[in-house]
Amino acid sequence: MSVAESNLLTDKKVLTPQVAQRRTLKRIRTRDLCRVTRQLATLLRAGMPLVPALSALAEQLNEDRLAQILEEVRSSVNAGSTLADALSRYPDVFSPLFVNMVAAGESSGTLEQVLLRLAEMLQKRVHLAGKVKSAIAYPVMMMVVAIAVVVFLLSFVVPSITQIFIEMNRALPWPTRLLISTSAFLQTYFFLIAILVCAVLFAITAWMKTKEGRFLADRLKLKVPLFGTLFLKLEIARLARTLGILLASGIPILGALAVAKGVIQNSFIADALDKVMDLVSKGDDLASSVRKTGLFPPIVFHILATGQISGSVEDGLLDIADMYDGEVELTAKTLTSLLEPAILVITGAIIGFIVLAVLLPIFEIDQVL
């Protein structure tokens, strides 16, 4: 039995079934992977050998699943495996991009620099994703709360008030009649509407899991007013940074494009990247191939064309990534600042209409009296 196998068996004996199950189920966050990558680069830069550096990181993480993985990686490296090969055994944690860059760093003797680039890229990815999620989540949360308040008023508060007007057997203003009809409709069909909404959401979710459904949904996502531009800029920033770092690490253009495709979350853009790869494989340069897709903004292929002339395509890609990183942050802030007052105004108008519909009959009664 090898030393690596002996260490792995020893680790497994120490773990209780509960701890092992918890480690298996726990999802490793990109933020945690970024921190570990940066710490490993720092230890290597300080002169610590790879195997002790992995042990130190695993010891620091304590009972984390990532600690278990790092211990197993350390055992594999100690048994003679390369770090890239050891990492590739955990594809759910270390992406092909991560593994390929580590392999390039090992072959060129610049592993610590590559790890630092990876850490910076992961950190920017987490930062940008957080900006986009907050730009989407906050308006959505406000809309959900607003809809819940309106439904509550129409279903439980309004009926008890309007029942008084109905019993008076008087002609009611049209806002009041509309409010009573809407409230009665919600009371009668509330559960049916709830079931129908859940069924539609379930059907849409199931459809989007299919290849055709996801492709069409990703294509429509880029055309959504306000948010479509944000999604496109985010994907371009992610793609440009990944591709630039891969090229700077010495990975050939076709291999870099294939690996960079894995970071794209929009299947429509991934399909466009397939066309770029096909054109590049036939002899076209990167800038003209990007231009022929018709998807990317003109400034992208102009910067790429300039980089090709000067021989610094990777620098051009990183400049594109930095530019769109800033635009994503600015767009996210703008959307949040625009949507928040818009939702408040719409919600206020609906509640104002409800209040008006309730007060109008009261005013008429006061005038009669």
Image: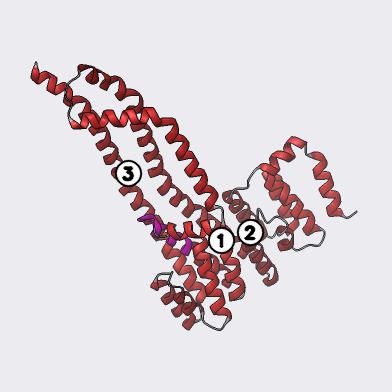
Say if 162 sits above or below 233 in the image.
above
Left or right: residue 173 compared with residue 18: left
Q: Is residue 234 magenta?
A: yes
Q: The residue under label 3 is which amino acid type?
A: Glu
Say if 281 sits above or below 154 in the image.
below
Q: The residue under label 2 is which amino acid type?
A: Ser
Q: Nearer the viewer, residue 286 or 48?
A: 286
Q: Which of 45 and 61 is in front in this view?
A: 61
| Mark before the other along the chain sequence, 1 or 3 | 1
Q: How much space separates mark 2 and mark 3, taking CA atoms? A: 37 Å
The residue range painted magenta reads 224-237
Q: Which residue lies under the disc numbered 1?
A: 263
Residue extending furthest right?
A: 1
**Residue 286 image offset from top left, x and y in percent:** 51, 77
| Mark before the other along the chain sequence, 2 or 3 | 2
Q: How much space separates mark 1 and mark 3, taking CA atoms? A: 31 Å
Q: What element carries label 2?
A: loop
Residue 207 — which label?
Answer: none
Q: Is residue 216 magenta?
A: no
Q: How much space separates mark 1 and mark 2, taking CA atoms? A: 9 Å
**Residue 63 image offset from top left, x and y in percent:** 70, 40
Q: In which quarter of the image is residue 258?
A: bottom right
**Residue 148 image offset from top left, x and y in percent:** 38, 33
| Mark before the other along the chain sequence, 1 or 2 | 2
Left or right: residue 298 compared with residue 357: right
Left or right: residue 305 compared with residue 264: left
Q: The residue under label 1 is which amino acid type?
A: Val
Say if 45 sits above or below 354 in the image.
below
Q: Which residue lies under the disc numbered 2?
A: 95
Residue 340 — which label?
Answer: 3
Is disc 1 in contact with disc 2, using a CB cutoff of under 8 Å? yes
Q: Nearer the viewer, residue 165 or 209?
A: 165
